[in-house]
Each structure stands twice: as C-alpha cells, then as structure tokens.
Amino acid sequence: MGNILAHQSWVPTPFYRAMSLSQKLGMDLWLKREDCTPVGSFKLRGALLAVEKHKALLKERGLCVASAGNYGLAMAFAVSVWQYENVVFVPENVTESKESSIRTTGAYVIKKGRDFDESKQHAKSYAQETGMIYWEDGVLPEMALGSGTIAQEIINVSSSWDTILVPLGNGSLIKGIALEMRKILPKIRIIGLVPSGSPSMWEAFHEGQGTAEAETQTIADGLSVRIPIQKITDEIKGLMDDVWLVPEKMLVPAVRTFLDTERILVEPSAAITLAGIVNNISSLSGEKIATIVTGCHVQTKVLQDALLGSSLL
C-alpha cells in the first residue's frame, strides 16, 4: 500500500457481511464501503497517490481535470492538502451535491459540456492554453494503483471469494482491483457492471470495440461513458471474466433497497452492484461475493424517487 494511504485514518474502509441482503438473496454478500472516505468515494485513494508523487510539478504548474463529480472532488481534496492551484471542469448536468463539495475544497469549478466527454475536451484545451497539468481519470496510473489497495484490504479479510462485482466506468477501478486479485486469487470471478443507459463499455468487452455514443441516458453519472478509452478497454478485457449490462430501471429501486436493508445511502453508480445481483441471481446463488460500494453522492430527486418508489426485494 502507498505510504500516504497507510497513514490515513480512514484506511482501511469498512468491509463486512451484509446480513439482511445475504439472507434475502441466498448468498454470502459483503460490502466494501468506499463511500466512507472523506470525499465519499473510492477515487480518493488514487488521487492522494498521484498528488503526493507529483507534488513538485503540481506546485509549479497547478492541476486541471475533468470529472462527472467523484474524480474531480477526490483530486480537489488531495490538491487542497498542499494548497496548489486546481481547476475542475464538470458537465452542465453535474449533481448539485458533487459540484458543491468540489467548491468547498477551494478548487475553481467550470461547468462546461453536455456530458463528461465534452467536459474532458474543454479541460484538455484549457490545460494546453494555461500550461496546467492535465490528468485524465482512467489513464492516470495512480488511479488504478489506488484501486488496487481496495483489493488488498478485501484479501486481508478473506481469500475464499467466489466472485467480486465491480461497477465499470472508465475502467481504472476494475483494472486496479483485478490486477491485485489475480496475483493472489487467480480463479476468482471478476465481473464488471454497466448501466444499460450507457452501454459503451459493455460493447467494448463483448464486441471488441466500444461504440462512441451520441449521448448517454443513465442516472448513474459515475458510470456514464460515451467514448471509451481504447487503451484502457484493451488492458482490462483480459482481466475480467464478464461484463453485465444492468437495466436502467433497476438502479433507483436498488438505492431504495440499500436504505431499507442495510440503512446506507448510495448513489446509483454504486447501487448497480445490487441491481446486477438481482438481475443475475441464478448465477450467484450460494456464492461468497464481494462488492464495492463506490460512492454516496445522491441527487435529491433520485432520493425522492427512491423513497416514493418500490424496492428490488
């Protein structure tokens, strides 16, 4: 584990058996609570590793990133530790809670682009014009390294897992987890979960190349990928056993189910693990399963819909 992470009071994050869900689903289901980091998502691990490693360069030039929310917040938090200049581009449809949280770190937030991929192009241009450092989530090696520490913490608890389910966005999370898991548990089944409203990463795995979508229609903003990064999809394809496409209509009920059964609030990008389990229950019955609760940033409207709607179980 990176030295800077070893000295964080929140590491390791909680990891425990979900008793109620395990009983209802007929399996031994465990939750890795990455929503319990100071920024409410797993992204902080890689952000701290990257900023600590490159702090001299960042002090000189500052940092520019693009994000749907969690990556930008994690980087802004990490950069604020050393009080370096930081600009975060977010899409115009960014959740209010994520935008507000980023601003509280002192970062300069620019809302530009109809989605994450457009924001990314604006951020790249801004960095070129200003001379700031630009770091792309998914490509930045430290993001996968940080994710790998999640796998290390899971293995430290038990090495007898059948399956691990990982939300699949740009790929850095599953890449880091899979690389570490394969070293110790080569036979573990590693499955990525993609929302049906943003299927490009599912297509990249099953059809060889992800299609650049005209737009995405997913409530799971952290998993919204319109244009896959080919380098990353090539790298992770051989690390995963499968990628499941999860119906969009199951995500909000999954948020409700987490509240009802485990009393935790998760964002749709994290709730996709539970939705994926329910949608593929026959292939998971009786297994010992690890899942990653990736984040807790929920729009008020999504929470209202979850509370007024039905549960998955």
Image (cartoon, rainbow, N blue to C red):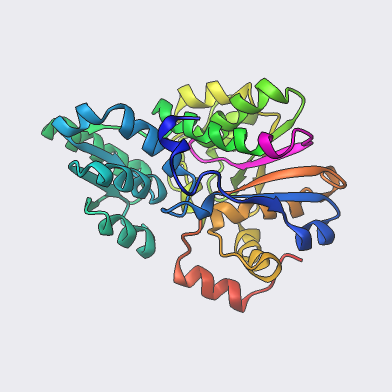
Q: Residue at x 20, y 27 (%)?
A: 57
Which residue is the extreme one toward the bottom?
308
Image quadrant where residue 167 sits: top right
Residue 172 visible somewhere in the drawing: yes
Q: Residue at x 63, y 21 (%)?
A: 238
Please tell me whether residue 159 belongs to the stretch shown in magenta: yes
Describe residue 99's horizontal placement relative to residue 292 as left or right. left
Viewer-proximal residue, 128 or 291?
A: 291
Residue 132 visible somewhere in the drawing: no
Query: Which quadrant holds the C terminus?
Result: bottom right
Q: Is residue 96 above or below residue 108?
A: below
Give the residues drawn in magenta, as a range.
Answer: 155-170
Q: Position of residue 1 (x, y in %)?
A: 51, 30
Q: Position of residue 16 (x, y in %)?
A: 69, 51
Q: Residue at x 46, y 60 (%)?
A: 297
Please tell me whether residue 75 belongs to the stretch shown in magenta: no
Tally of numbered tags: 0
Viewer-proximal residue, 14 or 264?
A: 14
Which residue is the extreme one toward the left?
130
Q: Position of residue 60 (x, y in %)?
A: 14, 30
Viewer-proximal residue, 103 or 167?
A: 103
Q: Residue at x 51, y 41 (%)?
A: 169
Q: Is residue 145 above or below residue 74?
A: above
Describe residue 227's horizontal placement relative to residue 159 as left or right. left
Viewer-proximal residue, 81 or 173?
A: 81
